[in-house]
Image (cartoon, rainbow, N blue to C red):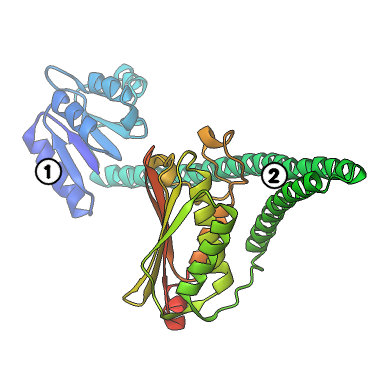
Amino acid sequence: MILIVDDRPENLISLQKVLQAHNFEVDTASSGEEALKKVLKNNYVLIILDVQMPDMDGFEVAEAISGFSKAKDTAIIFLSAVNTELKFITKGYLSGGLDYITKPVDINVLLLKIKTFYRIYEQNRKLNEVQEKLLEEIEFRKQAEHKKDEFISIASHELKTPLTSVKGYIQLLQRSLKRDDKAVAQNHLEKASIQLEKLNELIVDLLDISKIESGKMKFNMKPFCADNMVNNAIEMLQQSNPDFKISKLGQTDEMIFGDEMRLEQVVINFITNAIKYAPGTDQVNVTVNIKDEKLYVAVKDFGIGISKEQQQKIFDKFYRVEENSNRFNGLGIGLYICSEIINRHGGTIGVNSVPDEGSEFYFIIPTTEEEILKNQI
C-alpha cells in the first residue's frame, strides 16, 4: 500500500486517482502528524511525501519515520514545487528519502519509479523469507544434532546401568554358589533377571526407533479381540507390580483390525509409565470401549502429572521432562514409538494431565481395515 502525504486536498485527490487507476492500493494523510499515526498502525511499501507542509515539513516527517522499526523497509519519495535547490534535495536524501522529485511531476516517470520501488520491495521480501527459512533450518539442524548427542549420552548411561547391575549380581551369585547358599543365590538370580529385562526393554526400544527411522518397522495387521489384548497387558504388569491395583473399566467383545502385538506394546508402555511416574500411589485405571467403530483405550494414574507446555512435546522423539530426568530412568523414546504405532493405525494419541493430580494417556483408532487405510498419516 502507498501512503500519499500532502496538506493540499487537490494534490491528494488527483495523485490518488492516478495511482488507483493503475491498480495501486492508496492511503492518504493531510499532515505530518496524521502520517506518523498511520505509519504506526499500517504497513506501507512506499510513502510519497510533500516537502512543504505547515507545522511539520516533509523532512521532519521522514526523520521521524526512520526511527520506526516497522517502517525501516518503507521507501520514501519526496515531492516539492518550492524547495528545488540542490541543498534541499541533499537534505531529502539525508532525511531518509530514496528519491526527490520536483514539481511539476511527470506522472509517467513517477509511475515508473513507483513500479521500480514495488519490484525492489517484493524482491527484498522474498529474500527475507528465504533468509528466515534458512535460519530456521539451521536452528532446527543445530537442535536436532544437540538432541542426538544428548540421546546418545543418555542411551549409553541407561544401557550401562542395568548391565553393571547384572555383572554385580552374577558375581554375588557365584560367591553364593561357592558357599552352597541356594536361597541367597536364588535372590541374586531373580534380581539379575529383573535387570536383564530392563536391558531388553531398552534394546527393543532402540531397535524400534531404528526401524522407524529407516521405514522398516513391520506391522502384522489382522483381526483380533481388543479386550483380550488389553487384558494380556494388564495381567503381565499386574504380576510384576503386585503392590499396584490395575483396574479395568469397560469391556468389549468386538473384533478389530490392527497389529495386536504393537497395540499391546502401547498399552504396556502407558501402564508402565503410569506406575513409574506415580510414586507413593497404588492405583491405575485402564479404560477400554468401542464407539462409532473406533477403539478407545486410556490409562490413568494419580501421580506427578505433566504441565500444559510439556504435554505439547511429550510425544516428540528424545523428549524427556527436565525436572524428572534425574528421578526417573528412560530414553525418552517410548511415547514417540507409541505415537508412530498409533499413526500407522490411522488413529490419534494424546494426554490429559494436571500437575500433582495425575495423567491419562489415551489412543483412539479405527476398528476396520477400510477406516485405517483412509485415516493413515
- Mark 1 nearby-residue class (10 Å; few <14, some 14–19, many ≥20): few
Tell me if residue 42 comes above or below residue 236 in the rendering. Answer: above
Q: Position of residue 124 (x, y in %)?
A: 43, 42
As shown in the figure, which amino acid type bears the numbered disc 1? Ser
Q: Residue at x 60, y 77 (%)?
A: 220
Most extreme residue toward the right is: 178
Q: Which mark is residue 82?
A: none
Q: Residue at x 47, y 38 (%)?
A: 280
Q: Position of residue 201 (x, y in %)?
A: 67, 55
Q: Nearer the viewer, residue 376 or 55?
A: 376
- In the displayed structure image, the side of residue 41 where residue 337 appears, left or right: right
* Among the two numbered marks 2 and 1 on one chain, the one whose residue lies closer to the N terminus: 1
Q: Which mark is residue 14?
A: 1
Q: Nearer the viewer's eye, disc 2 or disc 1?
A: 2
Q: Position of residue 131 (x, y in %)?
A: 51, 42
As shown in the figure, which amino acid type bears the numbered disc 2? Ala
Q: Position of residue 192 (x, y in %)?
A: 76, 48
Determine the secondary structure under disc 1.
helix
Instruction: Residue under label 2, please give it.
Output: 155
Q: Quadrant of the N terminus?
A: top left
